[in-house]
Amino acid sequence: MTTVGYVWVDPLEHSSEFQRDLLRKHGVERVFEDISPNSSTPTRPQLTEALDSIAAGDTLVVWRLDRLGSTLSNVLSLLELLGRRGVGVASIVEELDTSGDDGKALLTIVHAFTQLERNLVRERTMVGVYAARARGRVGGRPRALSQTNVERVLLLREQGATVREIAQELGTSRATIYRVLEEENSEKSADDGQRTISAAASPSAQAFMPLIE
C-alpha cells in the first residue's frame, strides 16, 4: 500500500509549500505537483502521472477535493473512477477518506448520482451519438492518451462536459478528445452489430423466424 500526494497550485497562489507541508504531516510518501499558469485553462499533467503510478489498495491524498478538478462533475467522475480501481482518496480539509466505511458509503452515493446524470445526458444526446456512430470507423491511429485518461474522457463526456472542457481538464488537444470519442463510438457500433448477428443465429431467435416471416 502506497500513499501518494497531489498538489495543484492555481494562478492566485504563490507557493505549494503550504499544501506540501500538510501532506507530509499526513505521512505522504510521494508528491506530484501541478502549477497552472492560467486559471481559464487549468491543466493537470502531474495528476495523470499520479493516477498512473497508483494501484488498488493505494491512497491519493489532497489538501482539498477541488485540487482534483476544475468542476464538480470532474471531481465526482474521478472519485468514481478511482473507486472502481480500488484506490482510496483522502482529503485533509473535508476530513474524507474513501477507503474507510464512511468513505465507501459516500462512493456509493457518488456512483448513484453520476449514473443518474449519465443516463439523463445519454437521453438528451442520443441523436448525436447515432450520428457519430454512422460516421465512425473501426481501428485507426493509436490513442494519444493513457487508458486511465481515456476512461476519464468517457466519464466526463457522459456527464455532459464539452470537448473543450475535457481537453482543458486533461491538458490535451480537442482533436485528441474527438478521436477518442470517435473510436469509442466505432467500437460500440461494431459490438452492437456483432451482438445482433449472434442473437439472430441463436436457436431461440431461429424459432421465431417463421412467425416473423
Image (spheres, rainbow, N blue to C red):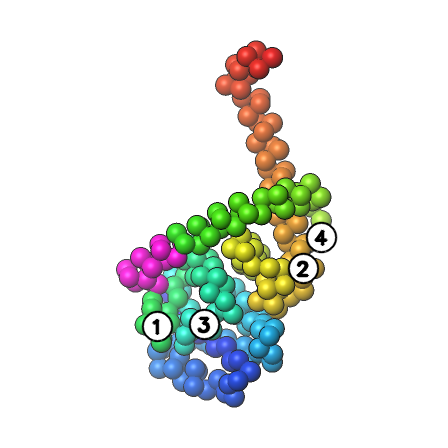
Q: Magenta residues?
A: 98-111
The residue shown at (68%, 54%) is: 179
- Give how far apart the Cα atoms at labels 3 and 2 are: 25 Å
Disc 1 crowd rating (10 Å Cα; few below 14, some 14-19, many 20+) is: few
Work out whether mark 4 precedes mark 3 in sequence or the reverse, and give the earlier one: 3
Work out whether mark 4 precedes mark 1 in sequence or the reverse, and give the earlier one: 1
Work out whether mark 3 precedes mark 2 in sequence or the reverse, and give the earlier one: 3
The mark lying in front, picked from 3 and 2, is 3
The residue shown at (59%, 62%) is: 166
- Give how far apart the Cα atoms at labels 1 and 3 are: 10 Å
126 or 81, which is in the foreground?
126
Which residue is labeled 2 in the image? 176
Q: Position of residue 172 (x, y in %)?
A: 64, 66
Q: Are marks 3 and 2 in contact (CB under 8 Å)?
A: no
The mark lying in front, picked from 4 and 3, is 3
Instruction: Name the quarter where the N terminus is drawn.
Output: bottom left
- Give how far apart the Cα atoms at labels 2 and 1 are: 34 Å
- Give how far apart the Cα atoms at labels 4 and 3 are: 34 Å
Q: Quadrant of residue 59?
A: bottom left
26 or 122, which is in the foreground?
122
Q: Position of residue 198 (x, y in %)?
A: 57, 27
- Give how far apart the Cα atoms at labels 4 and 1 are: 42 Å
The residue shown at (61%, 73%) is: 41
Which residue is labeled 4 in the image? 141
Magenta region, main secondary structure: helix
Looking at the rendered structure, the number of numbered marks drawn on it comes to 4
- Give how far apart the Cα atoms at labels 2 and 4 are: 11 Å
Q: Is residue 196 above or below residue 148?
A: above
